[in-house]
Image (cartoon, grey):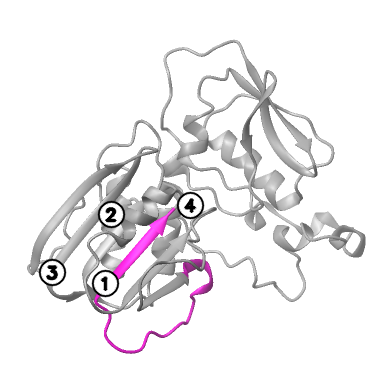
Amino acid sequence: MREGALNEALRGRGPGRLVLCHIGEGSDPGPDVPGDGVEVVDLRKADGREFDGPVERVVVLAGTTADLRAAVPLSAGLPSAADLRVVVAASARHTGPPLPTPPGLGQWEGLLHFQVGRLQGRGWSCSFAFTDPVDSGAVLRAVAQAMVGGRRGQAPPRRQDPDVVPATVPTWAVLGRPGALSARPALRELSVEDVPVVDERVVNPMGFRRGSTPRVGRLVSRGGRWVLVAGNGVRWRVPEDGAVSDVDVAGLRDLRAVRVEWGRHSGPLAAVRAVAGLAAAGFRW
């Protein structure tokens, strides 16, 4: 995680208990979070978690816009707080300032202060101060909607739990584990519905350019993991789950097309999801 994003997440912290939630590759602040009373929570592992006692501040630290939207369906159990901050470490160049729309019905009538600021790496920070504790999930949802244009109804992708495996049908996540294919050779059991969701509202139709270079990128295997190379340089390293973010897409928009060199790759999960994500972003093959 960029040090600036973590510093922003902790900026202006007062006394009392702070719940610091993180989501996205590289967002984990690690064990060296300064100060006492800080509870670090991995949102992807927080399902069913109960928070005891009052909480003065809730902070959500997301790696990208896509990570922030993925956090929304995971935020139902977060505690309420009067001081909230949402930090997105990086976003695409075209992303404007997230100016959230209040949820209505007087839910934010106690809002005392709101501030939005730009971070290095084209990230954003939104801070809220209320007279009384409010629903943290509602604040997170409003900021996530604002990151993609501010219109209500831009629902985040449905929640998926890669650790929950059906009794009879394997998932792409299961097949991506070492030795899984030798134990389950019948790939025909899988369907399109088993492919992890792609957040199309984030990757498409965003960041298109009027022109492109003649350069064609290639998805190839390097050290057992897929990477996208253009010329002699690596432009993108496919993450373990194959997720494509707005930041990834923005860094590849100058390419005319992407060529997939099938062979050894990061596993079925990463391969299928990465190809689906790049296709949703409008890349030619």
Find disc 4 in the rendering and name its residue.
1
**Which numbered disc, 2 or 3, marks the residue that appears first in the sequence?**
3
Instruction: Please identify, in this view, whether the residue under mark 2 or under mark 4 is nearer the observer.
Output: 4
Residue placed most toward the observer, 108 or 123: 123
**Which numbered disc, 2 or 4, marks the residue that appears first in the sequence?**
4
Instruction: Please identify, in this view, whether the residue under mark 3 or under mark 4 is nearer the observer.
Output: 4
Find disc 3 in the rendering and name its residue.
130
Q: Amino acid at mark 1?
A: Arg
**Which numbered disc, 3 or 4, marks the residue that appears first in the sequence?**
4
Q: Is residue 274 above or below residue 211?
A: below
For the residues labelled 2 and 3, the Cα–Cα distance comes to 16 Å
The answer to whether 185 appears left or right of 149 in the picture is: right
Q: Position of residue 14 (x, y in %)?
A: 21, 71
Which secondary structure, mark 1? strand
Within 10 Å of disc 4 (Cα), the crowding (few <14, some 14-19, many 20+) is some
Q: Is residue 17 above or below residue 270?
A: below
Q: Residue at x 28, y 80 (%)?
A: 55
Q: Position of residue 132 (x, y in %)?
A: 13, 77
Q: Residue at x 49, y 68 (%)?
A: 42
Residue placed most toward the observer, 24 or 285: 24
The answer to whether 205 appears left or right of 56 in the picture is: right
Find disc 2 in the rendering and name its residue.
143
**Which numbered disc, 4 or 1, marks the residue that appears first in the sequence?**
4
Magenta residue span = 42-62
